[in-house]
Amino acid sequence: MQPQLLPHMNKKTFLFVFFIFLACDVSSEKILIHNVNVIDPLDGISKNTNVEISNNKISSVGKKTSFFYSKKIDGSGKYLIPGLWDSHVHLYFDQELAKDMPMLFLKFGITSIRDTGGDFNFLDSIKKLSEKYSKSYPRLKISGPLIDGKFNVYNGERLPNLSVKTENVKETENVVNKLIASGADFLKAYEMLSPEQFEIIMKIAKKKKINVTGHIPLSMDIETASNLGLNSLEHIKNLELWATKDKNELLKVRRGMMKNTRNLSGLNLRGMIHNTQKNYAINNLDKDETIKIYEALAKNNTWQIPTISIYKVPIYKIFKDDYWIENLKYLPEKTREIWEERINFSNKNINPKQKDFSDWVQRTTKEMHDYGIEFMAGTDTPLGFLIPGFSLHIELELLVESGMSELDAIKTATINPSRYFNMENYLGLIKEGYIADLILLNTNPLENIKNTLDISLVVKDGKVYEDPLKID
Ligand SMILES: [Zn+2]
C-alpha cells in the first residue's frame, strides 16, 4: 500500500516539492556550529550555544532557526572567537612573499589586515582582489606609503621604498590629497616630517574624517602630536624622548641634527638621532613627565599599536628557538630557505641596551593599558623574521605577558580594529548580523592565550576552512 503523503499530492509531486524546498534551504548555505562556547570580546563567554551562519553572516546566536543545514559542525568542548586582525603589516616589504601572505594569514585565522606602509598601487591591487574574492583573502585596509619629510627614511636604497618623500608643506599637502582621493583607508605620518608638515596632514585628515597613524616626528613631541589629533601611534615610537626632565633640551638637539649638515641619508640620519637619544631617554625617565603623556594620550584617544613582537622576537633572538624554526615550514619554500640561512647566520647574543628597550616597551604597554588607553595588536610582519599570521598569535601572547588579560588581548585584535575603521556594527563580534569571520579553537584562550593557535577551523566571510594549518 502507498503511504498517505499529503492530500491531493501523489508521491512524485511530493518528492519534487520536497527537493525544491531542500534545494532552496541548502542554496542559502546555512551552517550550524552547535554546542560551542562563544567568546565575545565584549560580553565574555557563553557556554554550549549554537551559532548559525547564513551565507556570509552570523544569522543567529543561541537558537536554531532551521531544520536543514548545508553543514553542521560539532562545537562540543570548543571555543569560538571572532576572526583576528593583524593591525601592523607590510605586504610591500617582500613583494614575492606578498603573493602567499593572504593565504598564510587566513590559515592562522587572521581574517583582516591593516597594512601600515608601502606602494599605494601595489597595495590597492591586493585590496581590490580581497574585495572581489572576499572568501579567500583577508580583508585589507591600507595607508599607502609612509608620508615622510625631506630626508625620508625608507627611500629604497638599503630598505624597500615604503615611503614618499615630501620636501615641503605644499608637497605634503598634495600627497595627502592624492592618497585620500585614491581611496587610502588611513594615513601614516613618519619620523622626518617637520612640525608644519605634520600639522597639514592632521588638518586635511580632520576635514576628510580619515584616521592618521604614525611615528612621532623627531622634530616634534608626543603631546603636541596627540593634541593635534593623532589617532594612533605605532611601536610607541619616540614616546620616551618626551618622558625625561630634559625633554626640551633633547628636542632642541634633535631639531639641530635634522638640519643634516653632513648630508646623511634619511636612514642614517634617523639612526644617528635614535642612537644619541633613545637609550639615554629610557635611562632617564621621569615619572611625572610620563604620566603627563599618558594623560594626553587617554584624553585625545590616541590608540597604541605597540608591536611588541618586532622588538622582542629579534632582540631576544626568539627566532632561533626550535619552536620558531618549526613554524617556518608554513612559509613558501624560497622564503623559508632565505630566512633559515639568515637565522643560522645570526648569533645568539642579546644586546643589553636593546633588551632594556624591549622590556621598557612591555612595561609601558602595561602602564598605558592601566591608564585606559586603547590598543590594537600588530606585528610588523614580514620584518624581523615574523612569520605572517603566526606572529599575531605571538603578539597576543606578549600583550598578556605584559599584563593584559586574555580577553583584553583578544579585544585588541577583534573589535578594536573594527572600531578604528568604524566597522564595529558589523565586524569583530559574535552577534546576529555580524560578518561570519570566525575561528574555532580546540582549547580555551581565556585560560591560556597560546590556545589561539590551537585552531580547529577558520571561517572567512562564511567560507569554512577545516584544519587550515594542515592544508598545503
Ligand atoms: Zn611597520
Image: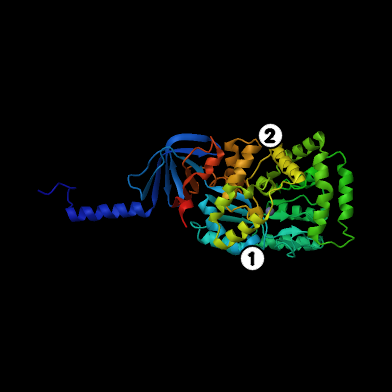
Label 2, secondary structure: give it. Answer: helix
Packing grade of label 2 (10 A; few <14, some 14-19, many >=20) is few
Q: How is the image coloured?
A: rainbow
Is residue 373 in sight in this rendering?
yes
**Residue shown at 89% from the left, 53% from the top:** 256
Is residue 241 in sight in this rendering?
no
What residue would you read off at disc 1? 121
What residue would you read off at disc 2? 370
What x and y, as percent, mark residue 14? 21, 52
Q: Earlier in the sequence, mark 2 or mark 1?
A: 1
What x and y, as percent, mark residue 347? 69, 51
Q: Amino acid at mark 1?
A: Asn
Q: How many marks?
A: 2
Out of 424 and 73, give the one closest to the viewer: 73
What x and y, as percent, mark residue 127? 58, 60
Cα distance between the residues tagged 2 and 1? 39 Å
